[in-house]
Image (tube, grey):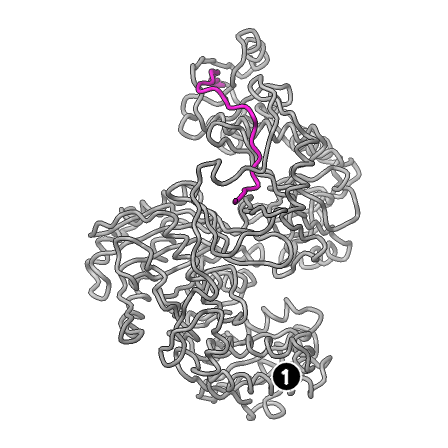
């Protein structure tokens, strides 16, 4: 039996909940954002007094501001009197809208947990005593208040929040950079990402901040507005640039933390298995219940089963039951792909090439050479082709450098003129030093991709210094590492159209109403600004339904938000690239063909409702104010594009506040390929397995199904999840164990990390 990390109240809400809608005619805030913040402050104060209420949703904002639930007339009269300065108008309703009830329940949970000594930091709650501890690892809980089937409920997930305090050295460095800082930080209370600019030049008690109709000194402001009461008047203030607002704000130092670097993982001892998560959740519920809501005393039970909620369960083939095609068009199970490569070679055939290596002087030259001898042998052993060093530069292809960023960039720029004259396939290997690895990784790529003086961009493979040391030894880790490096080099040398293996059945086979092998996948996101004055960049990566790489694309967009014009231009560019690829690489083999008819446009993250509405409107109507025709009209006028086209827009949330367990004596992880649908458009997919901790499923949502010059039924979310899961069996960078994400999403994530670091990535460059 399958369980969710869902805990539900024993009591169901009544069918109808009466209440009051209030309009405040005299609010001291003109801007929409300021007005909503002011209204939320009123709702927060009422919540603290035990009144269940919420700011009304957008569709009601023309008429009302705040909704109050299930309150007697005498109490509403007192509230009306307390709000008299804002000229309130009160309207009674027999049944408050469900969206407002949900928001009021979320407010009640947040207020209740605050009273129990927890502080909300972004999407997590942390005990106040833990906030003040010296540890970088804080015990936390992700809690999502929901109403399901009429029952107030909570998704509860015990987690760890990594909160790294800023050192004096880091703050001084930001000051010295004088507006050019690239130091990534997170700020309270919402854990918003920003760039540290340096000291503000004043203390918390020396400046006042507005909230509602009053002004508060910095220490009091944080307590009144955010319930953060550990700020003192003497606390130092720091300037942080927040890209999402395109403004710099002052924050108390205690509210600014160094960002947890991507790629880092929690220590194993902090990873909680399913049984421990359930035990901690039950203990937490025992400590906080009951919760008072609309005059009801709510107590909770759980975890709740999938079947009790009426959700549907699915199981998709994986491992020995999932098949791919390798060299010679041989069909093999994905679990046997390594042995199949040794026998049959890769799907796209042998691709030979040369390599050079930049390595730091902290590593012995012989260790580096021994490690790459193993990569060469593995490359040929898997029948990928022949990989040899290019001896025309350095010491027979090996270039020693220092350990600093400038050492690497200088060595690269010195070698590039000689490399530009080499016409065969070449890949540059950068061995990252023990320190400054992240900076070297991005800066070296920037120099190798740069088209300066007409030089062609160079393909890059990065390897950690510790990996070289492991490979040079004769231990068990040497061969798997050399296999993964060899496979990545193969794909990068091959470029567009290359694949070590492809899917036996096209990923879109489960989708009703379309021909299998007609879909293309474009994953998309908008980068964070690498520094304050830089532009954000929209980026995407493309693959076909069998797993062949097509291209990447980037476009500067200014702010970190997708605009209608940018989205339109991205779609047109994607369609053109796909059409060209379709013309060149239509045939997979005699049995499989790619005939483009459907574009799956997916966002690596959550798509908000207003963003999905914008996308659909742009596709159907174009951007008429800028002379951009509807997409259906464009495809009719471009011969290389299909006359009829289906477009599905999906969002892939990589870390939803939802877990899936099964019980067999104790709570355990479910197997990969397990999925549940909440409704026709949203579901959870477990796309990987783990031996430590608890699997984090993906939450996948179909936001829009658009058909142009044709009529195709809307796919069910179970079909979309099946399609996504098939694409996770294409992780060429991890031959022995397939990863969690679909191939186009992996490519997009890697592209995004490079773009966010300011690297200009060529469109035909594969980033694995």
Image-based side of 232 in relation to 447, left or right: right
Give the magenta-colored segment's residue range. 1-24
748 versus 21 height, above or below: below
> Looking at the image, which is closer to me, 445 or 583?
583
- Expressed as whole percent of the image width and height from the top left, the position of residue 430 reads 60, 77
Query: Which residue is found at the position 41% from the left and 61% from the top?
Result: 726
Residue 286 point in image, percent of width and height: 68, 31
* Above or below 83: residue 713: below
Q: How crowded is mark 1: few (under 14 residues within 10 Å), some or many (20 or more)?
A: many
Q: Nearer the viewer, residue 161 or 410?
A: 161
- The correct choice, above or below, for 285 with respect to 255 in the image is above
Residue 601: name its quadrant: bottom left
Q: What residue is at 53 percent from the left and 70 percent from the top?
A: 734
Give the labeled residue for mark 1: 371
Residue 761 in percent (x, y) is at 48, 69
Residue 559 in view here: no
Q: Residue furthest front?
A: 665
Query: In the structure shown, which secondary structural element does the residue marked by tag 1 occupy?
Result: helix
């Amino acid at each position: 039996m399958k369980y969710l990390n869902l805990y539900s109240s024993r009591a169901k809400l009544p069918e109808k909940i009466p209440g009051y809608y209030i309009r405040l005619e005299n609010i001291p805030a003109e801007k929409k954002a300021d007005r909503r913040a002011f209204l939320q402050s009123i709702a927060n104060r009422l919540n603290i007094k035990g009144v269940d209420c919420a700011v009304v949703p957008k569709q009601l904002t023309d008429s009302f501001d705040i909704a109050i639930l299930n309150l007697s007339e005498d109490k509403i009269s007192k509230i009306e009197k307390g709000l008299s300065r804002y000229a309130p108008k009160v309207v009674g309703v027999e049944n408050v809208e469900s969206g407002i009830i949900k928001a009021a329940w979320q407010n009640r949970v947040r207020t209740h947990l605050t009273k129990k000594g927890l502080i909300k930091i972004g999407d997590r709650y942390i005990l106040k005593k833990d906030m003040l501890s010296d540890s970088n690892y804080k015990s936390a809980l992700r809690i999502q208040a929901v109403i399901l089937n009429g029952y107030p409920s909570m998704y509860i997930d015990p987690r760890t929040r990594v909160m790294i305090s800023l050192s004096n050295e880091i703050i001084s460095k930001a000051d010295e950079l004088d507006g050019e800082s690239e130091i990534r930080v997170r700020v309270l209370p919402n854990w918003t990402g920003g760039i540290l600019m340096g000291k503000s030049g004043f203390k918390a008690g020396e400046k006042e901040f507005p909230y509602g109709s009053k002004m508060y000194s910095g220490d009091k402001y944080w307590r009144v507005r955010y319930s953060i009461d550990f700020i003192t008047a003497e606390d130092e203030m720091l300037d942080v640039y927040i890209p999402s607002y395109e403004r710099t704000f002052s924050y108390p130092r205690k509210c600014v933390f160094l960002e947890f670097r991507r790629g880092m993982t929690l220590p194993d001892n902090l990873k909680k298995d399913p049984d421990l998560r359930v035990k901690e959740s039950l203990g937490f519920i025992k400590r906080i219940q009951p919760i008072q809501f609309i005059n009801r005393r709510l107590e909770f039970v759980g975890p709740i089963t999938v079947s009790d909620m009426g959700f549907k369960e699915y199981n998709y083939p994986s491992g020995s039951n999932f098949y791919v095609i390798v060299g010679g068009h041989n069909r093999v199970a994905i679990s046997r792909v390594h042995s199949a490569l040794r026998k049959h070679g890769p799907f796209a055939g042998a691709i030979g090439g040369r390599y050079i290596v930049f390595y730091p002087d902290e590593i012995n030259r012989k260790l580096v050479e021994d490690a790459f001898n193993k990569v060469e042998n593995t490359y040929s052993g898997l029948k990928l082709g022949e990989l040899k060093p290019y001896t025309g530069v350095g010491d027979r292809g090996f270039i020693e450098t220092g350990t600093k960023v400038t050492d690497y960039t200088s060595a690269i720029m010195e070698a590039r003129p000689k490399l530009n004259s080499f016409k065969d396939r070449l890949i540059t290997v950068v061995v990252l030093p023990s320190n400054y690895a992240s900076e070297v990784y991005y800066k070296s790529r920037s120099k190798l991709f740069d088209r300066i003086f007409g030089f062609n961009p160079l393909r890059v493979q990065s390897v950690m210094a510790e990996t070289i040391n492991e490979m040079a030894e004769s231990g068990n880790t040497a061969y798997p590492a050399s296999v993964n490096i060899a496979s990545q080099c193969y794909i990068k040398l091959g470029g567009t159209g290359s694949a070590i293996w492809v899917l036996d059945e096209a990923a879109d086979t489960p989708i009703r109403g379309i021909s299998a092998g007609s879909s293309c996948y474009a994953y998309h996101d908008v980068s964070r600004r690498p520094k304050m004055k830089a532009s954000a960049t929209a980026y995407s990566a493309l693959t076909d339904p069998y797993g062949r790489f097509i291209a990447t694309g980037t476009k500067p967009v200014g702010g970190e938000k997708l605009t209608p014009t940018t989205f339109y231009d991205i779609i047109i560019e994607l369609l053109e690239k796909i059409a060209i690829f379709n013309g060149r690489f239509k045939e997979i083999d005699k049995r499989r063909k790619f005939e483009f008819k459907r574009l799956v446009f997916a966002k690596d993250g959550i798509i908000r409702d207003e963003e999905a509405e914008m996308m659909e409107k742009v596709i159907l109507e174009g951007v008429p104010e800028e002379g951009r025709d509807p997409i259906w009209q464009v495809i009719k006028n471009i011969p290389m594009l299909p006359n009829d086209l289906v477009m599905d827009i999906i969002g892939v949330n990589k870390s939803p506040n939802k877990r899936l367990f099964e019980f067999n004596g104790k709570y355990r992880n479910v197997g990969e390929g397990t999925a549940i649908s909440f409704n026709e458009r949203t579901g959870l997919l477990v796309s990987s397995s783990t031996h430590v901790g608890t699997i984090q499923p993906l939450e996948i949502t179909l936001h829009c199904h658009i058909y142009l010059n044709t009529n195709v039924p809307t796919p069910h979310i179970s079909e979309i999840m099946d399609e996504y899961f098939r694409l996770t069996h294409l992780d060429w960078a991890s031959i022995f164990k397939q990863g969690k994400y679909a191939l186009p999403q992996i490519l997009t994530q890697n592209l995004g990390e490079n773009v966010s670091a300011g690297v200009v990535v060529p469109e035909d460059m594969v980033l694995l």
